[in-house]
Image: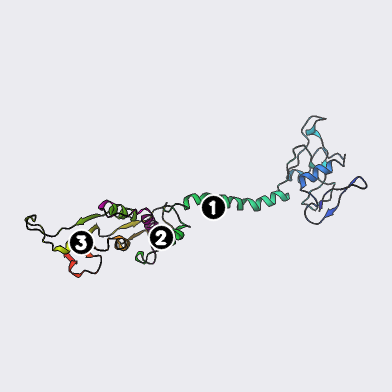
């Protein structure tokens, strides 16, 4: 049973109502203090086994001191033992039992506060495009992503790289700008530019380019761009290794000057047992497609 003290102002006395659940007016600690003010009953010097289990100890101070005061609350707010059979020893800094209601509430609330604090701290990491996870879709929606060129299941690393590349792209038509843009996407490239053949400038063994080649440029990149699974950046169910350059082609065809013709040269192992270079037109220009071995 639970007990509490209700101060009867009209009759100047303290009443002890018995309720069926928690203490009627207060938590066990403050109720114990109030009960002690209305009783001079002396507790046994030697506590019972149940008292010890509940954290009740024998008075330890010298006679006449606060620590030696045996007065207290003879009962337990969360037990069916009648009042008068157990002692919650009263001191000025008495310890609330772990079964008290405030502790029970704390055990329910503390995981929530801990979770909220962790989530708030994670916002610092998630707010940056290069480390975001939960806000990645928001960044993509802002930048017109995801891009169909990335396939049906791009990795988190690839999606982040595409977001970062678009955010950090300052524009410009220089070779350095395009190389930096590709690096943000995760590709190491070089760029080849062309000039039409001129009789007074052409040298032996130089290719004969017609005037249309003045508007062409080639991105040279490894045959396969490999993205490896990493513990700190990859996530469950992502492939250990992924490769491809569809994103590179899509992004550069999006930002290339409209009057130019973009080609892609892939160097490396393009077919079993064969090494060489393949040059593919990045747009519809059939005569620019060639294979050199």
Q: Position of residue 63 (x, y in %)?
A: 82, 30
Q: Earlier in the sequence, mark 3 or mark 1?
A: 1
Q: Pointer 1: what residue?
A: 119
Reply above or below: 13 against 216: above
Within 10 Å of disc 3 (Cα), the crowding (few <14, some 14-19, many 20+) is some
Left or right position of 37 against 293: right
Q: Pointer 2: what residue?
A: 143
How far, Cα to Cα, is label 3 from label 1?
52 Å
x 82%, y 41%: residue: 72
Quadrant for residue 245, please give it: bottom left
x 86%, y 49%: residue: 16
Tally of marks: 3
Q: Can you say which quadrant of the picture contains the C terminus?
A: bottom left
Within 10 Å of disc 2 (Cα), the crowding (few <14, some 14-19, many 20+) is some
Q: In this orientation, which residue lies closer to the viewer: 265 or 3?
A: 265
Write down the region rendered in magenta.
152-176
């Amino acid at each position: 049973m639970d007990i509490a003290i209700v101060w009867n102002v009209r009759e100047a006395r303290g009443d002890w109502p018995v309720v069926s659940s928690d203490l009627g007016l207060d938590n066990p600690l403050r109720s114990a203090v109030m009960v002690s003010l209305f009783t001079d009953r002396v507790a046994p010097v030697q506590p019972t086994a149940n008292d010890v289990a509940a954290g009740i100890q024998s008075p330890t101070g010298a006679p006449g001191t606060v620590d030696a005061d045996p007065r207290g609350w003879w009962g337990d707010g969360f037990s069916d033992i009648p009042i008068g059979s157990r002692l919650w020893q009263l001191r000025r800094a008495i310890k609330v039992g772990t079964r008290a209601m405030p502790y029970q509430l704390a055990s329910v609330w503390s995981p929530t506060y801990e979770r909220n604090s962790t989530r708030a701290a994670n916002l610092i990491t998630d707010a940056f495009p290069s480390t975001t996870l939960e806000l990645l879709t928001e960044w993509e929606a802002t930048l017109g992503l995801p891009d169909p060129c990335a396939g049906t299941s791009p990795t988190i690393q690839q999606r982040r790289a595409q977001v970062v590349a678009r955010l950090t792209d300052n524009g410009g038509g220089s070779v350095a700008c395009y190389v930096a843009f590709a690096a943000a996407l995760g590709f190491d490239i070089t760029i080849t530019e062309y000039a039409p053949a001129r009789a007074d400038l052409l040298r032996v063994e130089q290719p004969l380019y017609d005037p249309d080649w003045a508007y062409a440029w080639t991105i040279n990149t490894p045959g396969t761009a490999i993205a490896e699974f990493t513990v700190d950046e990859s996530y469950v169910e992502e492939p250990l290794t992924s490769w491809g350059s569809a994103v590179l082609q899509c992004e550069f065809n999006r930002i290339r000057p409209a009057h130019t013709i973009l080609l892609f040269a892939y160097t490396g192992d393009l077919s079993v047992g064969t090494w060489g270079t393949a040059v593919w037109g990045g747009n519809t220009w059939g005569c620019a497609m060639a294979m050199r071995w």
